[in-house]
Image (cartoon, rainbow, N blue to C red):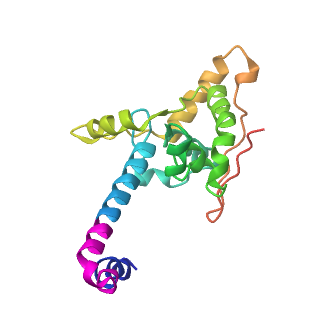
Amino acid sequence: MIRRQMTKDYVLHPLLSGPSAITTLTANLTANLVRNLWTHSVIMCGHFPEGVQTYEKESIDGVTRGDWCLRQMLGSANISGNRLLHLMTGNLSFQIEHHLFPDLPSNRYQEIAPKVQQLFERYGLTYVSGPMSSRSARRGRRFSGSRRQTTSCARRRRRLSRRALTSSSSARRPRSTPPRRSPPDRRPAISLG
């Protein structure tokens, strides 16, 4: 598939453009470079800024439904900006909402973001969000010479449970439900209501 697209972009289309072959080739190279740099920036800023948890591949064995949801909440970050930025990212600037609700149309992420933020506040979690410009500079520091931060979901969950038990307000306590395994072919649903 990649070979076919590269053949179109760098051989077929330039040849079809006749005397403008060099211009077409240059335009295709420039467009692909800009698109790939933009995509890389959006992905890196949504997954690897400061404050976002990363997990080792081996730690996914036996993940419960609650652990899966918690990982999605702690393992991604939003990019703040204006409507144009959200449009240019395909609304993937709402990365937390995208991870929690991957089947939801992306134009609805902004609508549910306040409810997701309330959920974070209710459980004492940090809703990581910030501008792309500062994220791009910091993410380089995170990977250059520093060790990737890994967190056990079960450990984080225990801390949240202890915090909820010591909380004076019963409204802030998370529900204690027995862990259930998610079916491997379905993602769990989360109720924000």
x and y, in percent, of residue 26 in the image: 26, 69
- Residue located at (70% from left, 23% from top): 172
Residue 28 within the segment the image draws in magenta: yes
Residue 37: image quadrant is: bottom left
Q: Which residues are magenta?
A: 13-29
x and y, in percent, of residue 59 in the image: 45, 50
x and y, in percent, of residue 23 in the image: 26, 72
Residue 33: image quadrant is: bottom left
Farthest residue, direction left: 145
Farthest residue, direction right: 193
Camera-side residue: 70 or 51? 51
Relative to residue 21, is residue 120 drawn left or right?
right
Quadrant housing the C terminus: top right
Quadrant housing the N terminus: bottom left
Farthest residue, direction top: 168
x and y, in percent, of residue 114 in the image: 67, 34
The vertical placement of 71 against 181, above or below, is above
Residue 149: image quadrant is: top left
Q: Can see residue 124?
A: yes
- Residue located at (55% from left, 28% from top): 159
- Dominant secondary structure (helix, strand or loop) of the stretch shown in magenta: helix
Camera-side residue: 2 or 96? 2
- Count of numbered tags: 0
Residue 90 within the segment the image draws in magenta: no
Camera-side residue: 78 or 157? 78
- Residue located at (51% from left, 40% from top): 153
Q: Can see residue 95?
A: no
Relative to residue 65, is residue 33 drawn left or right?
left
Farthest residue, direction front: 19
The vertical placement of 1 against 81, above or below, is below
Camera-side residue: 14 or 151? 14
